[in-house]
Structure formats: C-alpha cells, structure tokens
C-alpha cells in the first residue's frame, strides 16, 4: 500500500506544478515576469490552464479520501487484495485524469473520475 501512497503524492506534485507551468512562460497566457511579481493583475488563464487548475483541485479532494483509507490499510498491516486493487485503480485513474481533463474531450474526464472513485469504494469496502 505504501507504494500507492507514494505514487499518489508524486501525481499530486506533478499536478501542483502543471498549472503553474502552463500559466507562466512560453506556453501560458502570462509571462515569467508576471509570475515573479505579486500576481495582482494577471491575464485570464488559457482553457488548458484552467482545466489543469481544476484537475489539481479535484486531486486535493480525492486525496482527502484516498490517504486516510490507504493509511488505515497500511497501519493495519494487512491490506486485502480488494484494497490493493482499489488503490491501483485509483492511481492509474489519477494518472490518466490529468491529460483526460486537460484535453477537454467530452465525457472522458467523467469516466476516468468515476473509475478512480470505484477504486476508492473498493478500498473503503475492504476495511
């Protein structure tokens, strides 16, 4: 289970920086100089940047469910196969969620989000 906890943290770190990297610099709507200032008056974010920011916020919400479940399984010392499979489903879904949300393709984000939550449900039911 510890491997999945580490994986979720790494995915979160990637999401944490992806919004900033697509907002400032050559790919974004704002310059690097704007990112170094107080950010009081920023240009509107690009659609992709907005989606990446919302995906990051969704990851925070999902981690508030995943981490306690994963930690409970870890400290119990016995994570059933269902919990391990659920954690794997969650991690894979969160990896796919980033490009799925950023792409803006109708329905894909919702399907991937649902798959991740099925993984969380599997973890919860195995407690």
Image (cartoon, rainbow, N blue to C red):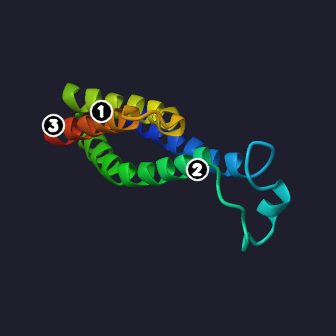
* Measured Cα–Cα span from mark 1 to mark 2: 22 Å
Q: Residue at the spot x=46%, y=33% of the render?
A: 105
- Whichever of labels 1 and 3 marks the residue nearer the N terminus, that label is 1
Q: Which quadrant is the N terminus positioned in?
A: top left
User: Which residue corresponds to mark 3?
Assistant: 126
- Where residue 71 sits in the image (x, y, percent)? 32, 46
Question: Mark 2: few, some, or many residues within 10 Å (few <14, many ≥20)?
Answer: some
Which of discs 1 and 2 lies nearer the camera? The answer is 1
Element on which disc 3 rests: loop
- Which is nearer the N-term, disc 1 or disc 2? 2
Question: Dot 1: what SS?
Answer: helix
Residue drawn at point x = 20 percent, y = 40 percent: 121
Please identify the quarter of the rendering in which residue 78 is found.
top left
According to the picture, the residue beneath numbered tag 1 turns out to be 115
When the figure is inspected, residue 79 is found, relative to residue 70, above or below; the finding is above
Task: Specify the label residue 16 is tagged with.
Answer: 2
Q: Specify few, some or many for label 3: CA neighbours under 10 Å numbering under 14, 14-19, or 20 or more.
A: some
């Amino acid at each position: 289970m510890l491997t999945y906890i580490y994986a979720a943290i790494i995915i979160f770190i990637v999401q944490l920086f992806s919004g900033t990297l697509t907002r400032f610099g050559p790919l974004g709507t704002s310059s690097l100089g704007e990112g170094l200032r107080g950010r009081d008056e920023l240009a509107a974010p690009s659609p992709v940047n907005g989606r990446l920011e919302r995906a990051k916020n969704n990851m925070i919400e999902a981690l508030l469910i995943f981490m306690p479940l994963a930690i409970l399984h870890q400290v119990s010392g016995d994570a059933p196969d269902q919990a391990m499979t659920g954690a794997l489903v969650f991690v894979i879904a969160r990896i796919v969620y980033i490009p799925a949300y950023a792409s803006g393709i109708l329905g894909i984000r919702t399907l991937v989000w649902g798959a991740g939550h099925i993984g969380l449900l599997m973890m919860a039911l195995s407690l």
